[in-house]
Image: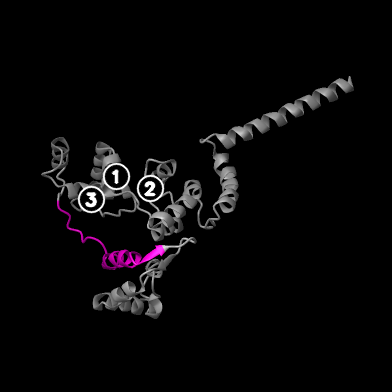
């Protein structure tokens, strides 16, 4: 009797182990498994470091960014930017990254990492085309009821980034070019077609064109770092009076503790010179 009970126990234990093995195998193959993102990420880390020799930054926590990061680096090395076309598997993951960014599901460190790489987040056109018009309209009405500022929602509205971008694009399209049905809906709520808010920051208006010009004189090396290939071009840019004055102003602000860490990081990403010793 004891022998039968012992044999039955062994059979039951074996069945349980087999079931667990199958469950784990399913978890690894199912795109909807929570466990998959943990196990696959750990495995993918080793694979990417061994096969592509790409070191994954420790700040990356998003499984999507973890998977696509080596491809972003490879694309930037070859084409000068990390914006992979949508017609590929990696391109679709880039689109997912953009959606996660707009939903505020990426950490600030991950956002900064992507920004410094030159990753293009959703354009205003993308947001407008993909958003549900009537749903956004309801959210806009709720915003106005709460703030009562004549629909002057910021472009980068932190509580609802998608809504801020959507409104910005509506104003860019303009009342005369808007679909009639949508125009009538906006008119019916008293929407202000012209924004009274100041557009953009002075820092970024100067930083972006300078970055583009300096990168045009450089290339990405195998480590994913910018290297100058046209030193004369960089020297000529930095000698321009307006450019030199702006860089010195940022340096002075940093020396006085009046420049944010994020802006210091932006300046440090500029290829061809060290702004702190400029």
Q: Does residue 259 lie above or below 101 as drawn? A: below
Q: Is residue 268 left or right of residue 235?
A: right
Q: In the image shown, does 176 or 47 lie closer to the viewer?
A: 47
Q: Is residue 127 magenta?
A: no
Q: Does residue 174 lie above or below 262 as drawn? A: above
Q: Secondary structure at mark 1?
A: helix
Percent x, y of residue 97: 41, 47
Quadrant containing the N terminus is top right
Which residue in the structure is indicated by mark 1?
A: 126
Q: Which of the 4 image quadrants contains residue 3? A: top right
Which residue in the structure is indicated by mark 3?
A: 168
Q: In the image shown, does 93 or 155 lie closer to the viewer?
A: 93
Between disc 3 and disc 2, whose residue precedes? Answer: 2
Which residue in the structure is indicated by mark 2?
A: 98
Residue at figure coordinates x 34%, y 53% from the top left? 158
Asked if one can make out residue 160 in the rendered structure from this viewpoint, the answer is no
- Tell me which segment is drawn in magenta: 194-219
Percent x, y of residue 208: 30, 64
């Amino acid at each position: 009797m004891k022998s039968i009970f012992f044999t039955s126990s062994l059979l039951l234990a074996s069945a349980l182990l087999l079931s667990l093995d199958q469950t784990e195998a399913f978890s690894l193959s199912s795109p909807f498994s929570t466990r998959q993102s943990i196990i696959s990420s750990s495995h993918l880390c080793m694979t990417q470091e061994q096969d592509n020799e790409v070191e994954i930054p420790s700040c990356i926590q998003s499984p999507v960014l973890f998977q696509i990061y080596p491809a972003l680096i490879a694309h930037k090395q070859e084409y000068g930017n990390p914006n992979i076309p949508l017609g590929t598997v990696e391109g679709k993951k880039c689109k997912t990254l953009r959606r996660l960014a707009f939903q505020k599901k990426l950490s600030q460190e991950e956002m900064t990492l992507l920004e410094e790489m030159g990753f293009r987040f959703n354009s205003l056109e993308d947001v407008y085309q993909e958003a549900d018009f009537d749903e956004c309209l309801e959210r806009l009405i709720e915003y106005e009821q709460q703030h009562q500022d004549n629909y002057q929602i910021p472009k980068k509205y932190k509580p609802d980034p998608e809504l801020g971008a959507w409104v910005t694009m509506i104003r860019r399209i303009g009342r005369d070019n808007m679909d009639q049905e949508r125009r009538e809906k906006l008119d019916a709520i008293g929407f202000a077609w012209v924004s009274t808010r100041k557009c953009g920051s002075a820092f970024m208006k100067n930083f972006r064109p300078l970055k583009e010009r300096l990168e045009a004189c450089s290339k990405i090396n195998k480590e994913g770092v910018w290297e100058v290939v046209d030193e004369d071009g960089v020297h000529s840019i930095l000698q321009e009076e307006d450019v030199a004055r702006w860089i010195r102003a940022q340096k002075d602000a940093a020396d006085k503790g009046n420049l944010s860490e994020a802006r210091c990081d932006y300046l440090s990403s500029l290829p061809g010179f060290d702004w702190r010793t400029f």
